[in-house]
Amino acid sequence: AQIPNLVAKLHQELQAPPKSFNYSGKTSNPCQHQVLSLLVVAEDESFIHPLQVEGMQTGIQVHGVTEIAAARTAISQQVPDAIFLNLDCPKFLKKSLTFLEELTAQYPWLPVLVLVGSDALSDRLEIVRRSRCQVLSKAIATHELFASIRELVDAKRLAATRILAVDDDPHVLATLQQLLSRWGIDLFTLDDSNQFWETLNAVAPDFLILDVEMPQINGIDLCQLVRSDRTWDKLPIMFLTAHQDAATIQQLLSVGADDYLTKPCTEPEIISRLGNRISRSRRICAQP
């Protein structure tokens, strides 16, 4: 009987949510403590190694390849959080254009950054016509590159995501609406759990946020309802709860919750959790 309690306590310690809600309206870095995976494609290995060294110090795991074919293989095995191509060499640029088209077609949500060796308008036009990548100049410093990668990953993870939040507290729903709308998220709110099933099917969300205690039908029952349906059983679910006791946390995990945050929570925490869960779900769907 003690093992479930210990598991729940360990999970709670690992989550370590902050103890105050601090919505200041300022843009935060939601992934400042998250490790990102970056695939670097460059013809010269000496270009890759310094990025790997500095990446280890800044929470970015860099995997480098020197051939386009190797990049395709790496992505087929594990889709990274972002891709960075060094197209300084004109020959490598020509070989990479088809690859950029493939990335745009197969992984439209995947952040791609391209480093060009010249400011030639023709080269830049050719790149942006073939892909939706961000073009960087050769003069960019490594710390600026990594900052651009994190910013792009954060925006891509959350952009155009449909989230359904169910909570009987209008203040909580209003706060979520104010916060998430700034990240390009389509948030749909529901304060009456009796209307949950028809709203779920009408909204068709990418992510579900549930409160635990609600009148009529509580969040635990709603979670079980979702997990029992073949259409929605893979939908990522996160609970927002005021409870921190081991029994409640264990119950949330046992009914199929992917994650939870204890109220009150901070802006960086909720954005980071949402981004990570949504990104993981998209990577799983993208796997062949």
Image (cartoon, rainbow, N blue to C red):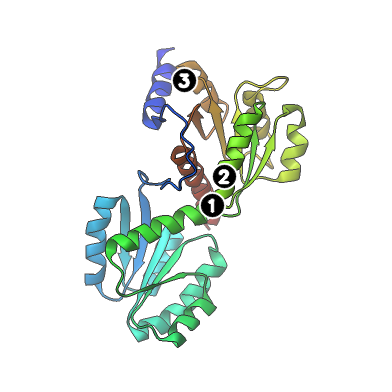
Query: Which residue lies under the disc numbered 3?
Result: 244
* 115 shown above or below 230: below
Which of marks 2 and 1 precedes in the sequence?
Answer: 2
Mark 2 or mark 3: name the one nearer the start of the chain: 2
Residue 143, percent from left and from top: 29, 60
Residue 123: quarter of image: bottom left
Query: In this rendering, is residue 173 above or below 231?
Result: above
Q: Residue at x 48, y 69 (%)?
A: 133
Front of the two marks 3 and 1: 3
Mark 1 — residue? 282
Residue found at x 46% / y 62%: 111
Q: Is residue 71 above or below residue 170?
A: below
First in residue order: circle 3 vs circle 1: 3
Which mark is drawn over residue 24? none
Residue contact at pointers 1 and 2, CB within 8 angstroms? no
Query: Which residue is depicted at the point 26% across and 67% down?
Result: 48
Asked if labels 3 and 2 touch by Cβ distance under 8 angstroms, the answer is no
**In the rendering, at what x and y percent does residue 247 appear?**
49, 16
